[in-house]
Amino acid sequence: MNKKLLSLLIVIFTGLLFLSGGVLIAADVPDEVSIDNQGYKKDKKGPVKFSHKKHSTDYKVACTDCHHEYKDGKNCWKEGDAVKKCGDCHNPKKKDGKVMKLQNSYHKNCKNCHKALVKEGKSDKAPFKKCNQCHAKKAK
């Protein structure tokens, strides 16, 4: 086998390997995520049903807009890295140094993004004003 053909086959195989890895990673992402109020001193609101698929596919929200791993003040998380639960770093009961409480981090990320979309005229449906626009009724 000549070197050009062998090189071409190696390039094609490597490309297919990366492509299949990306498909497997993407297939592992749930369409909907339930953000439950676990660990709070008092659970005041019901869970939030979050459409991961709509945000990533339809709305083109970058993965790093939500997923992060900060080192030296910079987000070094990249697609394909493990996704931690938000509560692994954000304590639901108290702020820890520069790391916000869990509820505050959700609200800052979600509400501020929705508010900006409405302000910029990119959406008139991104909820951010009333709790029940995102939170389901709390189960009793």
Image: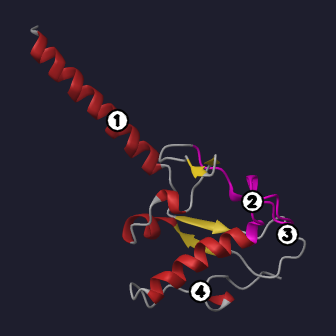
- Residue indicated by mark 3: 40
Identify the amino acid type marked 1.
Answer: Phe
Identify the amino acid type marked 3.
Answer: Tyr
- Residue indicated by mark 4: 128
Separation of residues labelled 1 and 4 (CA atoms): 38 Å
Model colouring:
secondary structure
Q: Secondary structure at mark 4?
A: loop
Q: Secondary structure at mark 1?
A: helix
Closer to us: mark 1 or mark 4? 4
The reply to whether callout 4 and callout 3 are in contact (CB within 8 Å) is no
Separation of residues labelled 3 and 1 (CA atoms): 41 Å
- Which quadrant holds the C terminus? bottom right
Residue at 63% from the left image edge and 51% from the top image edge: 73
Decide which of 41, 78 is in the foreground and name it.
78
Decide which of 90, 72 is in the foreground and name it.
72
Residue at 74% from the left image edge and 52% from the top image edge: 88
Decide which of 131, 98 is in the foreground and name it.
98
- Residue indicated by mark 2: 99
- On the picture, is 131 further left or further right than 9? right
Above or below, 80 relative to 37: above
- Residue indicated by mark 1: 18
Closer to us: mark 4 or mark 3? 4
Where is residue 90? Give x, y as percent: 75, 59
Identify the amino acid type marked 4.
Answer: Phe
